[in-house]
Image (cartoon, helix red, strand yellow):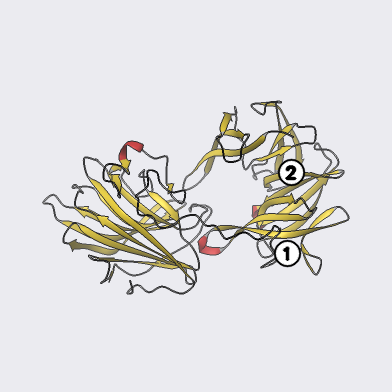
Amino acid sequence: MPPACAITTACFISSSHRTARTHRIYRTTDIKGPWTYTELDRAAFDPGLFFDADGTGYIATSGGWDGTLTLLTLDVAYSKIVASKEVYFNKGAEGSKLIHRGDWYYLFNAIPSRLGMTVSRAHKLEGPWETRNQIDDTTGGHQGALVDLPDGGWYGFVMVDAGAIGRMTQISPVFWENDWPVWGAPAAPGRVPLSAALPLPAHPELRLATSDDFSGATLGLQWQWNHNPDNSRWTLTERPGFLRLKATKGEAFWTARNTLTQKGFGPSSQAVVRLDISHLQPGDRCGVGTLGKYSAQATVETTANGHRTLALNLGEDTVDGQKATVLAPPQALNGGGLYVRTDMDFKTDRGHIAYSPDGVAWTPLGGDFPLAYDWRTGTFQGPQFALFCFNPVPGDGYLDIDSFDLTISASKTSPTTP
């Protein structure tokens, strides 16, 4: 058996295009780590890592623009590419995944032009391949493949564009018919069922931590930075029990570093954040909000004479750049303590923000704002809660965050209830 490996693509997403840089192949002898990696000499779009029966490693990649699938061959150590060959063409294909079953190789490709997925099969990796349509977003999703279980069963996994909440993963039973995989069950073939029996013995439900009192020595796994962080500008130790975000250099929310985010949950979720704003300096723009195609920020600013104000701004990321809207003009704040509550309701695809001096009496800040997912200008994950602090000319100002309390609910939230 080849050593356990995983592969990722280093890339960035801008308002109009995505650019891959190089690949890394990660490896370990224990799934819990530690992990090491090798950086390859090139990039490949949406790569699929595949190990053949003889241990040879391959990367399947298709950019989706002309539909040419390129098969990259790895050396015996899986540390560099030693051969490259174009082996298949399927107009618009991307997200290639390879598996081997019996006498056949199977190739799964997403077709973004129709938000669907095809499966192809061949007796050799070089082809010739024959292709069939599989499923689309109305019957299950796109970009996925199959896994086999110890009991001989097969399951498929796919992504589905699930509206404003973003892309989600779905699993489906799979059966075989004339050596072709068929998603679903024989009674309802060709679609991912809305629900299905768990393919493995039931285990207690596990979920990443969501709320955080920032008392730990490290950030929880639920948190993500919007860009590579500037680690000199945030700390959990300078004031124990608080996350301190020191103002980073930035002209605008979308491009400023050190915005800390975590996923919004459906059907609805509410985050209440307790802040200490007493150490902000003039020019600092710090606060709480959302990050996504529409980014709503409850922003605290300090004037030259030391007065603080709170405003609600909405940024829309478009293919032509950023559009900015003021949903609530600056309102005077008193004292150094502030609570901000952000609600996301994925039943209505609307969000709203409120603030409070004590966490009891709440005042809505502006009106509601849209929640949306857009693969061109969003973040693929859908809207995220966001904590931020930046300044075009940063100095000694900082924002202290005492707690982040997240509630997930099946009911619609109200902008006037705590």
330 or 81: nearer the viewer: 81
Q: Is residue 47 above or below residue 201?
A: above
SS for tag 1?
Answer: loop
Q: Of residues 104 and 270, which is closer to you in this image?
A: 270
Horizontal and vertical percent position of residue 117: 71, 54
* Left or right of residue 98, residue 322 in this image: left
Looking at the image, residue 213 lies above or below residue 236: below
- What type is the residue that disc 1 sits on? Arg
Q: Is residue 91 left or right of residue 340?
A: right
Q: Quarter-wise, where is residue 169 in the image?
A: bottom right
| Residue 139 % position (x, y) | 69, 64
Element at label 2: strand
Q: Residue 281, relative to residue 315: is it above or below? A: above
Q: Position of residue 212 (x, y in %)?
A: 38, 55
- Residue 137, image quadrant: bottom right
Return the mark for residue 191. 1
Q: Residues within 10 Å of mark 2 (few under 14, many from 20)?
A: many
Dot 2 corresponds to which residue? 98
The picture places residue 412, in percent across and down from the top left corner, at 44, 74
> Which numbered disc covers residue 288?
none
Q: Amino acid at mark 2?
A: Leu
Q: Quadrant of the C terminus?
A: bottom left
The quadrant the N terminus occupies is top right
Q: CA distance from mark 2 to mark 1?
A: 21 Å
Question: Does residue 254 show up?
Answer: yes
Q: Which badge, 2 or 1, comes first in the chain's sequence?
A: 2
- Front residue of 255/390: it is 390
Q: Please give the name of the residue rendered at 47% of the width and 45% of the height, measured from the top-left corner.
A: 14
Could one spot residue 249 in this view of the protein?
no
